[in-house]
Image (spheres, helix red, strand yellow):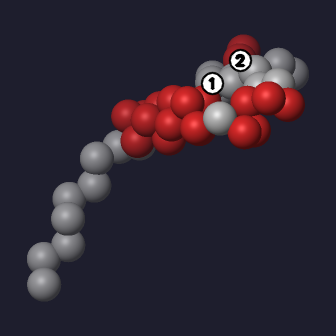
Amino acid sequence: MRLANAGFTVFNLVWADLFRSEMFTAIKKHIAESRPHQPKPTP
């Protein structure tokens, strides 16, 4: 089964991407936007 067909977002990384922050920032942003917003706990 292909991940993209299963509803996952696929980021195609190459070796050079491991040494740059842009791709990791994009992945982090995508994760934050795709998570359901949870209310902050009250103290």
Query: In the displayed image of the protein, which residue is found farthest to the top?
Result: 5
In the rendered view, does 39 fall on the left or right side of 25? left
Q: Quadrant of residue 19?
A: top right
Q: Nearer the viewer, residue 42 or 16?
A: 16
- Check the image and report above or below for 26 versus 36: above
Q: Secondary structure at mark 1?
A: loop
- Tell which circle, 2 or 1, labels the residue nearer the N-terminal end: 2
Q: Residues within 10 Å of mark 2 (few under 14, many from 20)?
A: few
The picture places residue 17, in percent across and down from the top left corner, at 73, 30
Residue at horizontal 79 percent and vertical 29 percent from the top: 16
Query: In the displayed image of the protein, which residue is found farthest to the left?
Result: 42
Q: Secondary structure at mark 2?
A: helix
The picture places residue 4, in percent across and down from the top left corner, at 71, 17
Camera sees residue 20 = yes
Query: In the displayed image of the protein, which residue is found farthest to the bottom?
Result: 43
Amino acid type of the residue tagged 2 in the rendering: Ala
In the rendered view, does 22 fall on the left or right side of 35? right
Disc 2 marks which residue?
Answer: 4
Q: CA distance from mark 2 to mark 1?
A: 6 Å
Residue at horizontal 13 percent and vertical 77 percent from the top: 42
Residue at horizontal 72 percent and vertical 15 percent from the top: 5
Q: Quadrant of residue 9?
A: top right
Residue at horizontal 85 percent and vertical 31 percent from the top: 15
Disc 1 marks which residue?
Answer: 9
The picture places residue 23, in percent across and down from the top left corner, at 60, 30
In the rendered view, does 21 fall on the left or right side of 33? right
In the rendered view, does 43 fall on the left or right side of 34? left
Q: Marks 1 and 2: in contact by CB < 8 Å?
A: yes
Q: Residues within 10 Å of mark 1 (few under 14, many from 20)?
A: few
Q: Quadrant of the N terminus?
A: top right
Amino acid type of the residue tagged 1 in the rendering: Thr
